[in-house]
Amino acid sequence: DAKTTQPTSMDCAEGRAANLPCNHSTISGNEYVYWYRQIHSQGPQYIIHGLKNNETNEMASLIITEDRKSSTLILPHATLRDTAVYYCIVREGDTGFQKLVFGTGTRLLVSP
Amino acid sequence: EPEVTQTPSHQVTQMGQEVILRCVPISNHLYFYWYRQILGQKVEFLVSFYNNEISEKSEIFDDQFSVERPDGSNFTLKIRSTKLEDSAMYFCASLIRGPKDIYNEQFFGPGTRLTVL
């Protein structure tokens, strides 16, 4: 079962920052937080992952609280193409080869 | 940019028939996966494959399912006798597992939509 809780849906205006929250209160010390997204029944796409420090890449930023019980994915300037289901996944290790356990995610709708 | 490809994009079959779903992972990747997504439901893990053998499989992956890497480039999922409930999108994924960089993650294909009538 998924170890995370996310809002079912969120809206965002194009060009604005989209902040997607995720609760993972039972996360253990060696578990990482991963974010994937799925655009309209396409294959899921990796976005970013982190352990305890904030992370940033060309797609997004990941802010993890100090107690690691929650995190926020930030899309700094959302576009219409960012409309998708976003999945927050907690997984042991950062080698990437373990299976991914998807929850129901947050459906983000970016509007003009 | 290299990508995972899957064929066919849509497969329609009769209940009880065998189907083979094909995937071409990214060429230097070493780990391979199948996931499925029933319409309107979560993406579910089926099986992982490394070094020519199954690493892990889920409860869904019963004796009706099998995987194979027949020629070093393709990765296939076979369903021996399809059931109505096998109707779903099937996603293949691959992973390089190398130095810690952005490519050390699972890359997914576009999926095959399987419809069992």
Image (cartoon, coloured by chain):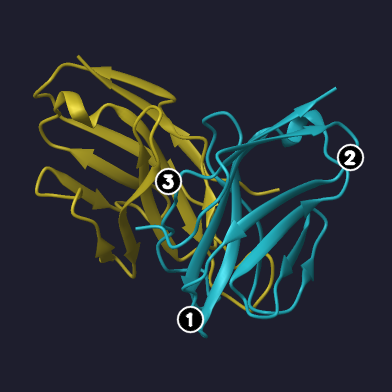
Where's residue B18, x and y in %? 15, 29
Q: Chain A, which colour?
A: cyan
Quadrant occupied by the C terminus of chain B: top left
Q: Chain B, which colour?
A: yellow
Q: CA distance from mark 3 to mark 2?
A: 33 Å
Q: Which residue is mark 3?
A: B92
Q: Which residue is mark 1?
A: A28
Where's residue B5, x and y in %? 51, 39
How many numbered marks, from 0 up?
3
- The chain containing the residue under callout 2 comes to A
Q: Mark 3, mark 1: which one is toward the viewer?
A: 1
**Do tags 2 and 1 sit on the same chain?**
yes
Q: Amino acid at mark 2?
A: Arg
- At 44% from the left and 51% from the top, the residue drawn is A102
Mark 2: few/some/many CA within 10 Å (<14, 14-19, 20+): few
Q: Residue A16: which numbered mark, if any?
A: 2
